[in-house]
Image: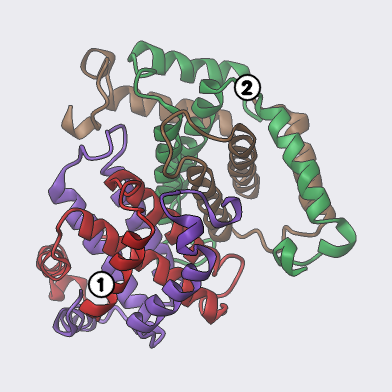
Chain colours: A red, B purple, C brown, D green
Amino acid sequence: MIDQSTVEKLLKFRDERDWQQFHNSKDLALALSIEASELLEVFLWKKNEDFNRDKLEEELADVLMYGLLLADKNNIDINSIILKKLQKNGEKYPVDKAKGKSDKYDEL
Amino acid sequence: MIDQSTVEKLLKFRDERDWQQFHNSKDLALALSIEASELLEVFLWKKNEDFNRDKLEEELADVLMYGLLLADKNNIDINSIILKKLQKNGEKYPVDKAKGKSDKYDEL
Amino acid sequence: MIDQSTVEKLLKFRDERDWQQFHNSKDLALALSIEASELLEVFLWKKNEDFNRDKLEEELADVLMYGLLLADKNNIDINSIILKKLQKNGEKYPVDKAKGKSDKYDEL
Amino acid sequence: MIDQSTVEKLLKFRDERDWQQFHNSKDLALALSIEASELLEVFLWKKNEDFNRDKLEEELADVLMYGLLLADKNNIDINSIILKKLQKNGEKYPVDKAKGKSDKYDEL
């Protein structure tokens, strides 16, 4: 879970630096994608669970912060979009068809 | 913010489908990065705020869900890693140097 | 175009360092994706043509090198896969429907 | 290697559809990064060499085509940027230090 107080500290950090002027939606999506790649780099040339935990935590924090900033920019309620997507995924991946399988829905 | 009840519904969705067996940390990072790119695609060839809001919400939900799953897999407390990263960023981007600038910290 | 002699220098660079042992296809795809994100970072918070040319050249070189290494690893003839994809794209984007439009083929 | 005739067919494909108007450098970098992620998806939840070869070829072709288009847009000579980067990498990864190691240069 992410507390409201955490989100507020993030927004305060942004606003103290007057960064909202740079935070258009497209560039926030770029930033999020770039951070997701830095998270991926933590695993490059490594086995699945063989990684530096501090780096993982740092890069995951970056990804989530840009996600929160993009949501704030567009007045998105994160809980409701996750619940909506879970419902949609439930239709694409019904338990009886998808259980124990990693296939994409169009290959199930 | 993300409610604990939202996180629990996500984990239940995963567990009902027995998907935890596929969710090693490296592939979760891949999935997150792939979803971040699908979010980016919402903006491809478009102006900064000219996008399909439904798609944005769906892709952002996907990104955040994989972030939550990766955190769960590694028993990561999301609030604490965000607060830790904010503190670190505060040192790299002190208000008096970074205010109103979009430069990277090593170019400030 | 990319000369055969350029490809050979790249492979020699790899082999002198005994790096082929790390270059499985999945991690080469990770590396390529990470470099593509570093290329993207050249444009972050910037206007479309407002970027550092030296950085662009460096990151584009990295992307292309991993593309060449992944092709070499899998004995892929790059010319033939590009020509094949152009043909396929030609069917998805026929000139009379796609001319002057940036829409995805399923929205044309 | 990539033949000049392959590059020319790619540019002809673009020009017949009048797509150069959409191809600013930033969005070409976005497109390249998005395609690199689709290439990555070929490996998601899979072992290192366990993938669909047709999909790999298609997605690699897409990545390389956007790389070629971005180079064309900026009059970049691909051979020369690769050779330049190989030289730079040679300094960061001298054979005697880097041989048989997958560490990043700042950890060697």
Q: Front-most of D83 and C96?
A: D83
Same subunit, tags 1 and 2: no
Residue at image position (20%, 71%) is A98
Chain letter of the residue beneath label 2 in the structure image:
D
Between A102 and A22, the one nearer to me in the picture: A22
Which amino acid type is shown beneath numbered disc 1? Glu
Q: Quadrant of the N terminus of chain A?
A: bottom left
- The structure residue drawn at horizontal position 61% and vertical position 60%, both measured from the top left corner, is C24
**D73 left or right, relative to B72:** right
Q: Nearer the viewer, residue B62 or C13?
A: B62
Residue ID at (57%, 60%): C27
**Any part of residue D51 in sight:** no
Q: Where residue D3 is drawn, which disc sits there?
A: 2
Residue D54 is situated, as x and y percent measured from the top left of the image, at 44, 44
Q: Residues within 10 Å of mark 2 (few under 14, many from 20)?
A: few
Q: Numbered disc 1: what chain? A: A
Please identify the quarter of the rendering in which residue D2 is found: top right
Disc 1 designates what residue? A8
The residue drawn where x is 72% and y is 58% is C20
Residue A102 percent across, percent down from the top left: 31, 69
Examine the image and state in which quarter residue C90 appears: top left
| Mark 2: amino acid | Asp
Does residue D40 appear in the picture of this structure? yes
Label total for image: 2
Q: Secondary structure at mark 2?
A: loop
Which element is circle 1 on? helix
The alpha-carbon separation of the residues under discs 1 and 2 comes to 54 Å
Q: Are marks 1 and 2 in contact (CB under 8 Å)?
A: no
Picture quadrant where residue D44 is located: bottom left
